[in-house]
Amino acid sequence: MNILNSLNKLQELASKNPALKQKLIETENKKEPMEEFCKIATDNNCPINIGELLALNETMWNNMLKSSNGGATFPMEEWSDAYEQFISSLKF
């Protein structure tokens, strides 16, 4: 299973299980939020490791920069990552 499939499956599980949803949201307050998030995901048969999550972030931003009229000439001032986007989606 690739990371996108794992994230989609985890999103579906969390939408049906309020306890899991809350547990995932609470990872924001942990010392190592992404590590805890990956552990919870893997424990729920949605295998994700930190390396994959960071690589997804890198790919996402590289593609975004390449897609803007030949590439951006300046770095983005602010951006969120896949973990932050996932947690934000659980809150709505």
Image: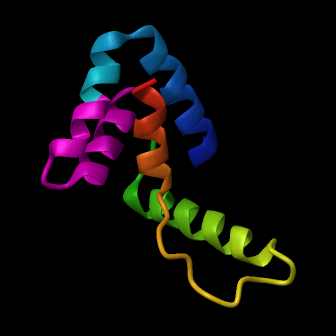
Q: In the rendered view, would you say 17 is above or below 20?
A: above
Q: Position of residue 2 (x, y in %)?
A: 61, 46
Res 90 quadrant in image? top left
Q: Position of residue 68 (x, y in %)?
A: 80, 74
Magenta region's main secondary structure?
A: helix
Q: In the rendered view, would you say 54 is above or below 7?
A: below
Viewer-proximal residue, 5 or 24? 24
Viewer-proximal residue, 18 or 91? 91
Left or right of 6 on screen, residue 84: left
Where are the magenta residues, as a range?
24-46
Which residue corresponds to the image point at 32% horizontal and 20% vertical from the top-left? Answer: 20
Where's the N terminus, which quadrant? top right
Q: What colour-coding does the image apply? A: rainbow
Which residue corresponds to the image point at 57% horizontal and 47% vertical from the top-left? Answer: 3
Q: Residue furthest right?
A: 69
Q: Assess whether residue 56 is covered by the magenta stretch.
A: no
Viewer-proximal residue, 92 or 33? 92
